[in-house]
Amino acid sequence: MDGSAELEAAERVVMRWDSTSASDEPMLFDGARAEAERFLRAVDDLRRLAPPSPAAVGSPRRLSSGSSSVSAGGGGGAATAVQVAMARLEDEFRHVVDEDDSVSSLVGRRSSYRSLPSIREIDLLPDDAVSDLRAIASRMAAAGYGRECAQVYASVRKPAVDASLRRLGVERLSIGDVQRLEWKALEAKIRRWIRAARAAVRGVFASERRLCFLIFHDLPISNITVTAAAPATHDTPFAEAVKGAALQLFGFAEAISIGRRSPEKLFKIIDLHDALSDLLPDVSDIFAASKVAESIYVQAAEIRSRLADAVRGILSEFENAVLRDPPKTAVPGGTVHPLTRYVMNYSSLISDYKVTLSELIVSRPSASARLAAEGNELAPSLAELDLPEPDNQTPLAAHIIWIIVVLEHNLEGKASLYRDTALSHLFLMNNVYYIVHKVKDSPDLWNLIGDDYLKRLTGKFTMAATNYQRSAWLKILNCLRDEGLHVSGGFSSGISKSALRERFRSFNAAFEEAHRVQSGWCVPDTQLREELRISISEKLVPAYRSFLGRFRHHIENGKHPELYIKYSAEDLEIAVNDFFEGVPPSPHIRRRSHS
């Protein structure tokens, strides 16, 4: 067959599939493979025997619909047949790429092009469909219709990508929508976003890029309209298909990164930062290789940087919040202050995130200058605080120690609110004990602040406990001394019964007042409460028993001894067990029956 006959035969095959001639025609690639192969060979023959002139290149749909069909072998028939062929291939391409991807294999697989181990592509379309799409795209690109083919691809895959993200739970929220959400609702959305982003990047976007690679790799699609700085590649249709979804996905993280900074947001923002950091190599692998899609990687990297800035800003805001917490009113019973619990729980969580925070926190706190600039009323006294600075201390450790130092200082101000000196010492004892044990309960926190500072805290607790016992019990124990009970002339001269009776009255009144008041004080830690009671009993009960043993016969030989000797040593021991429960005491001290 000579060239003219071949051309006429090719035209006849193509013109039978003129898309403008019938509305309910079957699709070539849905039918017998032989007919599709015959059509593709005819297209190849047309391109070989009658290559199109540059002026003929354009939308095959527009050009073919604007031309009247011609019979095979007619003048200009080859040019028209090429347009008909391209219009048919465009329709076929759209139909095949738009197939329901529920037939996709959901098993992760490694692809033939460069990709990270964390990426798991899935087959979005069956192998035979991909083969058909590649066959169609190669003919259209060779005929100068690569742009039109890529546009069809992007127009079909874009809604498919959007639907995939919706199934993953990615919501279409503006930056304003995100920033108007209550924090609790936003926390839940951040958790969902992290899961969705991993699946979107490593599954959806990676799979879309793989599909696009398999279809367009090495095809001449350079007539796609792009900038000189971003020449078209096989990634261009992929970028057009996923760019909107990717920008929507990362837009959520961007809204968080530029939102209002407050301490409660720190840890979820670190989670977000870490998730994005973990994904960035994958984002680079999927997007940065393409100039068209590189802006998505650049945006993700910038958001990660802004999240890091937010973390640093929130830590600074947390320090300032501790500094600014005013004394206000004293907590009842000298218990652990809510600020202490909040700060130490927060510090423990900071230590849990020490890997990330050690990377992000690179400067030590400079509190005195900041306080002075802010006019904080604590600035003068805080400027004099001793901030431990071991040689090997990290900036993060310095920040945590500084936070606890400021907390201690703040607690001292709160202790001064108590009129009872003993209660102010008990308050400090409770709070420093809580700080010490939160450090000991968290190996990471302990490792950060170091043994030296922990010893300093422990010493402060011991001092507060000693000061409490001295101020609360010295006066009561002084009632049990011998001084002032002897008649002038020495010990052998005798005992003043009136002074002794007064001494018993004073002791009873002082102990009853201590019982009434200190039963309402609170030591929330069970072990500390028991140790404190034992310590009091060990000082009080033996001293009272000895005093009673030396002097009770002087009272019992007189009138109404029960008015003075009201309690046995065992009664005191029982009564001490009422202390530090933080509840109103019983009207009377519990007593054992006297034998």
Image (cartoon, grey):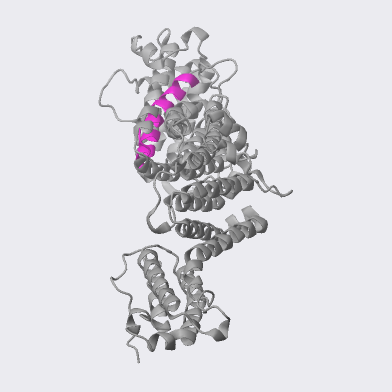
51 to 594, vertically: above or below: above
63 to 125, vertically: above or below: above
Q: Residue at x 37, y 40 (%)?
A: 183
Query: Viewed as shown, does residue 545 lie left or right of 463?
Result: left
Query: Viewed as shown, does residue 167 lie left or right of 108?
Result: left
Residue 194 in view (yes/no): yes
Quadrant (top left, top right, bottom left, bottom right) of the C terminus: bottom left
Q: Main secondary structure of the magenta part?
A: helix
Nearer the observer, 387 or 478 = 478
141 to 548, vertically: above or below: above
Residue 266, image x, y percentages:
48, 42
Nearer the observer, 593 or 269 = 593
Residue furthest right in the image: 391
Residue 2 in view (yes/no): no
Residue 401, image x, y percentages:
60, 48
Q: Residue at x 58, y 81 (%)?
A: 490
Residue 162 is inside the magenta segment: yes
Nearer the observer, 455 or 195 = 455
Residue furthest front in the image: 489
Nearer the observer, 188 or 563 = 563
Q: How many marks?
A: 0
Query: Viewed as shown, does residue 179 lie left or right of 473?
Result: left
Residue 566 is inside the magenta segment: no
Quarter of the image holding residue 192? top left
Residue 508, image x, y percentages:
39, 73
Query: Viewed as shown, does residue 257 lie left or right of 354?
Result: left
Residue 122, image x, y percentages:
46, 45
Residue furthest left in the image: 24
**What residue range appears in magenta?**
146-172
Q: Residue at x 40, y 10 (%)?
A: 74
